[in-house]
Amino acid sequence: CGVDRAEGDGQGKKGFCREGDQLRVSFVGPHFGEEPPISGKNGSGTIFFSGCSLQCSFCQNYQISRDCTGKPTTVPRLLERVKKLCLEKGVHNVNLVTPDHFFPHVIELVSRMREENLNVPILYNVSGYQSVEMLKVLEPYADIYLPDFKYSDSHLAQRLSKVKDYPEKALEAIVEMVRQKGFLHCAEGEDGVANRGVLVRHLILPGNVENSLKAMTCLFLEFGKDLPLSIMSQYHPVEAHEDLNFNRKIWEKEFEVVYAHALGLGFRNLFVQFPRKNRHGTTEERASSFLPDFREKKPFGEKA
């Protein structure tokens, strides 16, 4: 965005991400709501950073992405919390959620982890709207990429996320991620958790099935049927929209059309968030973990 966040000795300007140069974190802990190869049985060691470089109007994590409820910390303090996650909780990976605007801190954190022989996979849980140049810098500090591919429709991307060039930028970014790490690879053995590679996510948006169909087709044409793809149905309205479609959850029929299209294209490595049905024909979340409350000590309502 061009803002010099380092200006002013820690009191500098805030960027589009709504953060300055002070590292701020909203939650650190095991999370069991990711795809099975990511969460495993012990959970994914998530670090939710405060702020976000995309600012989607429908973000379910709006409390931290827009309201910026995180607390200031330092890399050494964060490292101590990560050690506990790895050594005491036995998490399968360290899951960096929307870390883009804190990449310098993240690189330092990963470097220190490796110096201390904390060799769990490092996962970047990102929006897809990353620059290829930055991803190349990250290559030695990453093991797994978990990007979204939100939009195939540039007008929808502009309306909901203020980034008209999202489709082409995200595709370029995912191509680079796959070049670096390949498709998601899971370790052999009982756990079968992921240790390297790329898994792409797509959230179905209500009233915009065509966006999802074109997104699936775009991914298939670029990467083929073996691309690991996660289809998510968890959309939940968090603020009022002029377009009334966005004030509801997705309909069962919308999910079925998108899912059938993915199967028809021949995707072989699908992770599918099947919705529960209700009598109104809309869908229900299967668990509260899909809509966290970061005001709580345990925002996902989980055992951890």
Image (cartoon, helix red, strand yellow):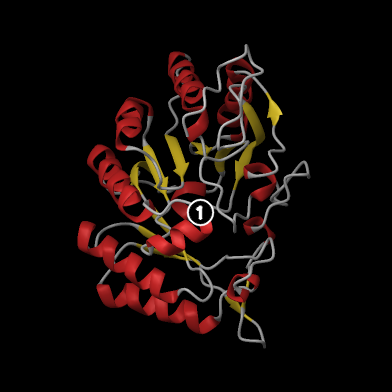
Write down the quadrant of residue 17 in the picture: top right
Q: Amino acid at mark 1?
A: Ser
Could you tell me residue 41's position as x and y percent?
54, 48
Asked if residue 104 is positioned above or below residue 170 in the image, the reply reads: above
Residue to which mark 1 is pinned: 161
**Residue in view at x 69 percent, y 61 percent:** 239
**Residue in view at x 58 percent, y 23 percent:** 83
Write down the quadrant of residue 271 in the picture: bottom left
In this view, the residue farthest toward the right is 296
Image label count: 1
Near-viewer residue (207 or 191): 207
Could you tell me residue 159's position as x and y percent?
50, 60
In this view, the residue farthest toward the top is 9
Write down the quadrant of residue 221 in the picture: bottom left
SS class, disc 1: helix
Could you tell me residue 126's position as x and y percent?
46, 44
Near-viewer residue (185 or 267): 267
Could you tell me residue 127's position as x and y percent?
46, 47
Asked if residue 200 is positioned above or below residue 176 in the image, the reply reads: below
Crowding at dot 1, Cα within 10 Å, few <14 / some 14-19 / many 20+, comes out as some
The quadrant of the rendering that contains the C terminus is top right
Asked if residue 84 is positioned above or below residue 75 in the image, the reply reads: below
Near-viewer residue (71 or 192): 71
In this view, the residue farthest toward the bottom is 279
**Residue in view at x 40 percent, y 69 percent:** 212
